[in-house]
Image (cartoon, rainbow, N blue to C red):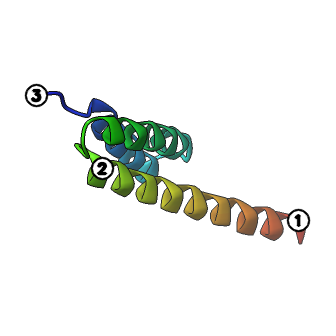
Amino acid sequence: MPKNQWAVAALALSILGLVTLAVPSVAGVIFGHLALWRANHLNGKGRAVSITAMILGYVGISIYATIFILWSLLLWNF
């Protein structure tokens, strides 16, 4: 029975991206898209996990982008 390891890797990277830097979130999104493509070839195995990983990855990217923009604006005003 084939498994979708890409989905598990994407989820791990997306979670890691939420607690560290945004770089793992970007990798989690990329792996999530690859896992979703792979899930279509495995009759849906790992589809929910890959979608969850992509959502968490995009949330992590948006949080860190917002923090970066606010931090830049705060420093620019001084």
Nearest to the observer: residue 77 or residue 24: 24
For the point 51% across and 38% down, which residue is it? 27
Locate residue 77, reporting x and y percent. 89, 72
In the rendered image, which quarter contains the C terminus?
Answer: bottom right
Locate residue 51, reporting x and y percent. 37, 55
Q: Is 5 positioned to the left or the right of 66 in the image?
A: left
On the question of residue 78 being in view, the answer is no
Circle 1 sits in a helix, a strand or a loop, which is it?
A: helix
From what the image shows, is residue 23 above or below residue 54? above
Q: As shown in the figure, which amino acid type bears the numbered disc 2?
A: Arg
Locate residue 19, reporting x and y percent. 41, 52
Q: Who comes first in sequence, dot 3 or dot 2? A: 3
Residue 47: give its label.
2
From what the image shows, is residue 8 above or below residue 74? above
Q: Who comes first in sequence, dot 2 or dot 1? A: 2
Which residue does the numbered mark 3 point to in the structure image? 1
Does the residue at mark 2 contact the one at mark 1 (Cβ under 8 Å)? no
For the point 36% across and 35% down, which residue is it? 38
Figure quadrant of residue 70: bottom right
Which residue does the numbered mark 1 point to in the structure image? 76
